[in-house]
Image: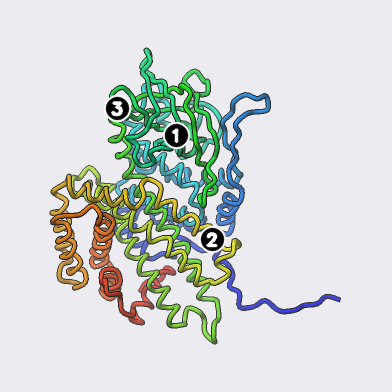
């Protein structure tokens, strides 16, 4: 006899087959406002495809089946390759087809390309974050290589700017698409790259021989890496290809893949250079300057990636709350839960507004004002958003309760993914110090802030008070206040954008919630309704 003990009911279905772009009103408006309205139709198409059950399953599979290091082939010859699950390759094909790795660097890049690319990045982050690591590094390295790629590798520029993903283990000049990795940190130094011990000696043909190690050799399957090493003239940046011009493998040995908390789909390795061949980029001693050029780009992507993960966690929680019945009501209609979800939506609104103003600044980096804006707000945004992401996803988990804590849900994977963006490319302390460095070395930054905030002066007392408090701190900033100052700059920057572009009730609610140290008061029912409607793509 078949015994049926109970009927399953009141269990919400998982969030699948949604349009990740059109369901996010703040994102749609930011893309249009900041100069990439021309990409809206394609973004809607990308959002629809990425929101399918099939795409989400690829993200799950890529993380459930992490990469495998293949050090030797069947004959015992050195291989140093990485094997990925097919899901990884399909996700990478989508990213490259959507030009997330090079949209801004095309010869005829359209105005607003940075803005469009930021939106595409955020959409992809909601499906799978590990694949964004090679995309970010390739994106950051490309402008440097366009200027300084060694002459014998000039034929790499065409595949570097293509929309193809090519995973074949072959020399770069034979491939349809290329990826670039980075090898910066060593065991004894981490962020203190000046303590690197890898040595580079110049050879008669102009190349260099590198001997040493890298503690994090990111995306080891890349076609080339940008590597820091100590040359005669100081710490320098080198182009180290996987295959040499004669077709032989370079002497870079992969020792192991990192066993990481999250970011499981992505390969991070340790490597040894046994007289590996590299070519100098720029001049000897310019290594730090070169990586700082790329660092701003990678740090911006960290903030974008964390925001995308936060948006997905919130979407899952909100969808659950609309379906789950508790104590005679839908969860979304319970006052305390409605307040929690509304505050999460409010936080995302401010982040979206600031990130896309920042994308516009990167797009206009030839303008002195925008370049300085990007230089200041990039580390501030990375610190604030990446730090905020961890408790934010934990809050989303609480909405689902025990379901959200189990691996069948997306949320455990998202939660494990969150810390990497806060750590990678500089931790919170490094970002705080970088903001202080900008304030000390760029006197015009105070005029920039004053000009930016003058346009919203008098609209909100919490904003005005916070700006006065920041000005007092900046008269004699203390290093120990670096994080606090960076976070306050981010919040004021986001607040200014909200006061300019959000409805007055929502903008004032944001300033009260984020800028009043005494804690925000209850959000009005109208503000809650507007925020939750916008979070599902509606127009308030």
Residue in view at x 27 percent, y 49 percent: 433
Asked if disc 3 and disc 2 are in contact, CB closer than 8 Å, the reply is no
Q: On residue 412, which mark appears?
A: 2
Q: Looking at the image, which is closer to me, 437 or 194?
A: 194
Q: Secondary structure at mark 2?
A: helix
Relative to 243, say whether 479 is above or below: below
CA neighbours of label 3 inside 10 A, class few (<14), some (14 to 19), many (20+): some
| Label 1, residues with CA under 10 Å away: few <14, some 14-19, many ≥20 | many
**Tag 3, which secondary structure?**
strand
Q: Which residue is painted at 28% across and 47% down in the image?
A: 363
Residue at 55% in and 61% down: 410
Give the Cα separation between the discs numbered 3 and 2. Answer: 44 Å
Residue matched to label 3? 234
Residue 441 quadrant: top left
Given residues 38 and 420, the one toward you in this image is 420
Q: Is residue 290 above or below residue 412?
A: above
* Disc with the residue nearer the chain's start (3 vs 1): 1
Quadrant containing the C terminus in the rendered view = bottom left
Q: Position of residue 93 (x, y in %)?
A: 52, 43
Task: Please state the horizontal and vertical placement of residue 336, each as a whole percent of the image.
Answer: 43, 80
Query: If the image is split into quadrants, where does the N terminus sit?
Result: bottom right
The reply to whether callout 3 and callout 1 are in contact (CB within 8 Å) is no
- Quick one: label 1 or label 2, which is nearer the N terminus? 1
- Would residue 17 be visible to someone looking at this image? yes
Residue 214 is labelled as: 1
Looking at marks 3 and 2 on the same chain, the residue that comes earlier in the sequence is marked by: 3
The quadrant where residue 196 appears? top left
The percent coordinates of residue 147 (x first, y second) are: 31, 30
Left or right of 448? Residue 514 is right
Q: Residue 254: percent from the left, percent from the top?
A: 53, 32
């Amino acid at each position: 006899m078949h015994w049926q003990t109970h009927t399953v009911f009141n269990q919400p279905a998982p969030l699948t087959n949604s349009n990740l772009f059109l369901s996010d009103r703040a994102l749609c408006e930011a893309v249009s406002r900041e100069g990439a309205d021309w990409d809206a139709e394609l973004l809607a198409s990308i959002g629809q495809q990425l929101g399918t059950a099939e795409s989400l399953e690829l993200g799950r599979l890529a993380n459930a089946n992490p990469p495998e290091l293949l050090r030797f082939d069947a004959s015992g010859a050195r291989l140093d390759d990485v094997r990925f699950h097919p899901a990884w390759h399909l996700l990478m094909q989508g990213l490259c087809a959507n030009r997330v790795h090079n949209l801004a660097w095309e010869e005829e890049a359209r105005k607003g390309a940075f803005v469009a690319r930021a939106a595409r990045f955020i959409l992809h982050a909601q499906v799978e974050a590990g694949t964004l690591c090679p995309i970010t590094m390739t994106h950051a390295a490309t402008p440097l290589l366009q200027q300084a790629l060694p002459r014998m590798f000039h034929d790499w520029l065409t595949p570097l700017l293509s929309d193809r993903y090519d995973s074949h283990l072959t020399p770069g000049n034979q491939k349809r698409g290329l990826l670039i990795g980075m090898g910066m940190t060593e065991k004894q130094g981490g962020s203190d790259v000046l303590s690197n011990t890898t040595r580079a000696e110049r050879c008669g043909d102009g190349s260099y021989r590198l001997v040493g190690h890298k503690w994090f050799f990111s995306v080891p399957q890349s076609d080339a890496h940008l590597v820091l090493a100590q040359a005669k003239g100081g710490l320098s940046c080198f182009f180290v290809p996987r295959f040499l011009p004669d077709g032989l493998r370079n002497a870079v040995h992969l020792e192991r893949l990192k066993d990481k908390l999250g970011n499981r789909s992505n390969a991070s390795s340790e490597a040894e250079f046994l007289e590996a061949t590299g070519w100098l980029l720029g001049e000897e001693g310019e290594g730090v300057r070169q990586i700082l050029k790329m660092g701003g780009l990678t740090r911006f992507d960290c903030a974008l990636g964390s925001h995308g993960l936060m948006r997905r966690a919130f979407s899952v929680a909100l969808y659950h709350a609309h379906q789950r019945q508790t104590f005679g009501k839908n969860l979304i209609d319970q006052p305390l839960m409605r307040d929690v979800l509304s505050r999460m939506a409010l936080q995302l609104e401010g982040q979206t507004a600031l990130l896309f103003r920042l994308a516009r600044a990167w797009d206009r980096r030839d303008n002195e004002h925008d370049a300085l804006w990007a230089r200041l707000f990039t580390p501030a945004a990375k610190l604030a958003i990446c730090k905020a992401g961890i408790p934010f996803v934990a809050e989303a988990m609480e909405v689902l309760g025990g379901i959200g804590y189990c691996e069948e849900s997306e949320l455990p994977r998202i939660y494990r993914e969150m810390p990497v963006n806060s750590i990678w490319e500089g931790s919170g302390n490094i970002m705080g110090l970088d903001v202080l460095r900008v304030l000390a070395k760029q006197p015009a930054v105070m005029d920039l802030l004053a000009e930016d905030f003058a346009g919203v002066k008098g609209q909100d007392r919490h904003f005005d008070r916070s700006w006065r408090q920041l000005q007092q701190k900046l008269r004699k900033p203390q290093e120990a206040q670096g994080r606090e100052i960076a976070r306050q700059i981010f919040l004021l920057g986001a607040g200014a954008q909200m006061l300019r572009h959000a409805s007055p009730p929502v903008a004032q609610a944001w300033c009260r919630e984020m800028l009043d140290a005494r804690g925000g008061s209850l959000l009005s029912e109208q503000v809650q309704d507007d925020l939750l409607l916008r979070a599902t793509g509606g127009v308030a």
